[in-house]
Image (cartoon, rainbow, N blue to C red):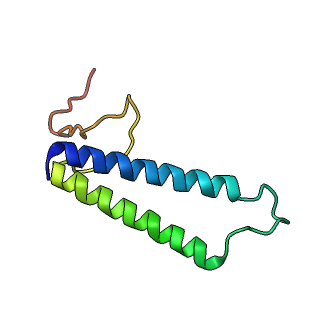
Amino acid sequence: MSEEQFSTERRILMAMRKTLGGIIRDLTPSDAATRYPLSDATVEDVKKCFDLIAARERELAQAAGVSEERPHFIDEVSTPKVVSIAGLKKRD
Protein backbone atom coordinates (compact mmCIF):
# COMPACT_ATOMS: atom_id res chain seq x y z
CA MET A 1 0.00 0.00 0.00
CA SER A 2 1.44 3.38 -0.99
CA GLU A 3 1.88 6.39 1.30
CA GLU A 4 -0.97 8.16 -0.51
CA GLN A 5 -3.32 5.22 0.13
CA PHE A 6 -2.29 5.21 3.82
CA SER A 7 -3.02 8.91 4.02
CA THR A 8 -6.39 8.58 2.28
CA GLU A 9 -7.44 5.64 4.41
CA ARG A 10 -6.36 7.47 7.56
CA ARG A 11 -8.38 10.54 6.57
CA ILE A 12 -11.42 8.35 5.86
CA LEU A 13 -11.12 6.66 9.26
CA MET A 14 -10.76 10.01 11.04
CA ALA A 15 -13.83 11.38 9.22
CA MET A 16 -15.86 8.28 10.10
CA ARG A 17 -14.85 8.48 13.76
CA LYS A 18 -15.68 12.20 13.98
CA THR A 19 -19.00 11.72 12.18
CA LEU A 20 -20.07 8.82 14.41
CA GLY A 21 -19.04 10.79 17.48
CA GLY A 22 -21.03 13.81 16.30
CA ILE A 23 -24.12 11.70 15.66
CA ILE A 24 -23.91 10.20 19.15
CA ARG A 25 -23.44 13.65 20.73
CA ASP A 26 -26.44 15.02 18.79
CA LEU A 27 -28.66 12.09 19.75
CA THR A 28 -27.68 11.96 23.42
CA PRO A 29 -30.47 13.50 25.54
CA SER A 30 -29.43 16.43 27.72
CA ASP A 31 -31.53 15.27 30.66
CA ALA A 32 -31.75 11.83 32.23
CA ALA A 33 -35.55 11.71 31.97
CA THR A 34 -35.53 11.60 28.15
CA ARG A 35 -35.30 8.18 26.55
CA TYR A 36 -32.25 7.53 24.36
CA PRO A 37 -33.45 7.34 20.73
CA LEU A 38 -31.22 4.45 19.61
CA SER A 39 -31.87 0.82 20.37
CA ASP A 40 -29.39 -1.16 22.46
CA ALA A 41 -28.43 -3.18 19.37
CA THR A 42 -27.63 0.00 17.43
CA VAL A 43 -25.52 1.34 20.30
CA GLU A 44 -23.55 -1.91 20.34
CA ASP A 45 -23.07 -1.71 16.57
CA VAL A 46 -21.73 1.84 16.88
CA LYS A 47 -19.32 0.69 19.61
CA LYS A 48 -18.11 -2.10 17.32
CA CYS A 49 -17.57 0.46 14.55
CA PHE A 50 -15.46 2.59 16.89
CA ASP A 51 -13.46 -0.51 17.87
CA LEU A 52 -12.85 -1.42 14.21
CA ILE A 53 -11.82 2.13 13.34
CA ALA A 54 -9.39 2.25 16.28
CA ALA A 55 -7.93 -1.16 15.38
CA ARG A 56 -7.32 -0.14 11.78
CA GLU A 57 -5.80 3.19 12.85
CA ARG A 58 -3.38 1.26 15.11
CA GLU A 59 -2.48 -1.06 12.20
CA LEU A 60 -1.80 1.91 9.92
CA ALA A 61 0.31 3.60 12.61
CA GLN A 62 2.36 0.43 13.14
CA ALA A 63 2.87 0.03 9.39
CA ALA A 64 4.05 3.65 9.21
CA GLY A 65 6.45 3.08 12.11
CA VAL A 66 4.61 5.32 14.56
CA SER A 67 4.73 3.81 18.04
CA GLU A 68 1.91 5.82 19.65
CA GLU A 69 -0.40 8.55 18.46
CA ARG A 70 -1.50 9.84 21.82
CA PRO A 71 -1.91 13.54 22.39
CA HIS A 72 0.64 15.30 24.57
CA PHE A 73 1.16 18.73 26.06
CA ILE A 74 3.58 21.08 24.33
CA ASP A 75 5.68 21.46 27.48
CA GLU A 76 5.59 17.73 28.27
CA VAL A 77 9.00 16.08 28.42
CA SER A 78 9.09 13.45 25.69
CA THR A 79 11.79 11.27 27.20
CA PRO A 80 12.50 10.77 30.89
CA LYS A 81 15.70 12.31 32.19
CA VAL A 82 17.58 9.95 34.46
CA VAL A 83 19.71 11.57 37.14
CA SER A 84 22.34 9.51 38.88
CA ILE A 85 22.20 9.73 42.65
CA ALA A 86 25.97 9.23 42.76
CA GLY A 87 26.35 12.42 40.72
CA LEU A 88 24.49 14.51 43.28
CA LYS A 89 26.71 16.40 45.70
CA LYS A 90 25.78 18.12 48.91
CA ARG A 91 26.17 21.86 48.67
CA ASP A 92 27.57 23.77 51.64
Residue at the spot x=79%, y=69% of the render?
35
Residue at the spot x=82%, y=58% of the render?
31
Residue at the spot x=59%, y=50% of the render?
22
Residue 80, x across and y down, in percent: 25, 40
Query: Is 73 on the left or on the right of 44, as rendered?
Result: left
Residue at the spot x=15%, y=33% of the render?
87
Residue 10, x across and y down, in percent: 31, 49
Query: Is 48 on the left or on the right of 24, as rendered?
Result: left
Q: Report the number of discs.
A: 0
Residue 53, x across and y down, in percent: 38, 61
Residue lying at the far bottom of the rendered structure: 41
Q: In terms of depth relative to the viewer, which is nearer, 15 or 83?
A: 15
Tell me, yes or no, if residue 69 can be seen here. no
Residue 60 falls in image quadrant: bottom left
Tell me, yes or no, if residue 2 can be seen here. yes
Q: In terms of depth relative to the viewer, which is nearer, 68 or 6?
A: 6
Residue lying at the far right of the rendered structure: 33
On the rendered image, what quadrant is the C terminus found in? top left
Query: Is 45 on the left or on the right of 78, as rendered?
Result: right
Residue 37, x across and y down, in percent: 73, 67
Q: In terms of depth relative to the viewer, which is nearer, 69 or 82?
A: 69
